Amino acid sequence: MYLRKIIKYIFIFLFQPFLLSQSYYNLGIAENYQVKEVRAGDKTLKEKYNKTFYYIYTYVYTKEKVKVYTTSSSDQADSFAYTNYKLSKIANDKLLLEIVGADNESRKLDISFIDNNQSINIDKSTFFLNQAYFSYLKKELLDNRNISELIDLIDDFLEEDIFKLENLKYLNSKSKYKYKKFRILNVKMTTINSQNENIKSDWIISYTYKNGILFSVEQKSKDETRFTKQLIKNRNNLVSYKVYREIDERFSDDKKITFDIKQNKYSEIGTYIQSGVNKETDYEKAIYKSVTFPATKVELDKNEIIKVISKLK
C-alpha cells in the first residue's frame, strides 16, 4: 500500500504539468451594446439600437492556445467568425504569437525579452518594466506561454495595428492591476497610419502610479496626444478610468470604463466622434453575463457553439 502511494505521488509530480496543459475550458461572454443617441452637426438622427455580441473562448489550461468565436447573432452558429492564437517559445528569450483567422488571413507577432534594461519588445513597441513585473512576465510568458498575461500587458493598445488582438480583451489576466509591485515604466511605440501605410508615428507612453495602483497613462509625441487614461475610482476590486483615444485625426473615443479586477465584469459609457462626417454617437457597452466551464477540446462544432450561447441567455 505504501509503495502504491509513492508511485501515485511520483506520477502526479511527473505528469501533472502535462495533464494540466491538456485540460480545456470554455469561457462565454455576452456583451450588450446600446447606441443611445446619434448626432450629425445639430441634427439628431434616428439611429438608436441595441445589439448583443457573443464571445466564446476555448483554450488549454495554460492559455498558450486560444480560439475565439465571435458573433452578434445568437441563432445561427454558422455566422460565427473565429480566430486561432498560439504562443510558442522559439528561443531562450523569444516568443512567437501566431494569429490565424477563419479566412486563413494570418499574422505573426515577434516578442523578445531584453534582460539588461528589463524590456519586452512586441512588434513595433518596447515596454520598459520594473524588476518585479519583468521577472513575473518572463515566467508567465516564456515558461508558461500564458496569452492572458500578454493581453494584460498591452490591454490599452489592443486597437492599434495588431491583427485581431482586441478579440482577446475578455481573457485579460488583470495581473498588473491586482499586484501593486508591478510597474510599466514607459513604452516606445510606432504606429502606422490606417489610411496611408507610408506615414509612421513614434510615441512615448508614460505611466504613473499612486499607492501601487495604475493612476494614469499618456501616449504622446512632440505635438500630439493619441491616448490618455486617468483613474477615477478604485474600490472593492472595481476600478474606473476616464479614457480618451484619437486615431489619425479621423475619429476619437471619449469614455469611462469600469471593470472588476477579479471577475469578468466590464462596462463603458462614452461618445464616439467621426471627424470627417461630423458625427457623434453616444453609447453604452457592458458584459451582462459570463460563464466558464470545463471542455474536452479547443475546436467546437455548431451544436457546441449553440450550447454555449444558450448558457448566456
Image: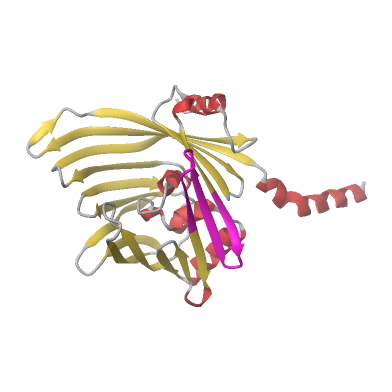
Residue 70 at x, y percent in the picture? 44, 35
Q: Is residue 55 visible?
A: no
Residue 150 at x, y percent in the picture? 49, 56
Residue 162 at x, y percent in the picture? 40, 53
For image coordinates 25% across by 37% down, the residue present is 283
Q: Is residue 281 visible?
A: yes
Q: Is residue 169 above or below residue 114?
A: above
**The magenta stretch spans residue 197:** no
For image coordinates 53% across by 41% down, the residue present is 67
The stretch in magenta equals 86-109
Observer-nearest residue: 299 or 45?
Answer: 299
Q: Main secondary structure of the magenta part?
A: strand
Residue 204 at x, y percent in the picture? 31, 68
Q: Is residue 301 above or below residue 159?
A: above
Tell whether 185 sits left or right of 20.
left
**The magenta stretch spans residue 94:** yes
Tell whether 124 sits left or right of 17.
left
Q: Quadrant of the C terminus?
A: top left
- What is the number of callouts on the image? 0
Observer-nearest residue: 293 or 142?
Answer: 142
Q: Is residue 42 above or below residue 158?
A: above
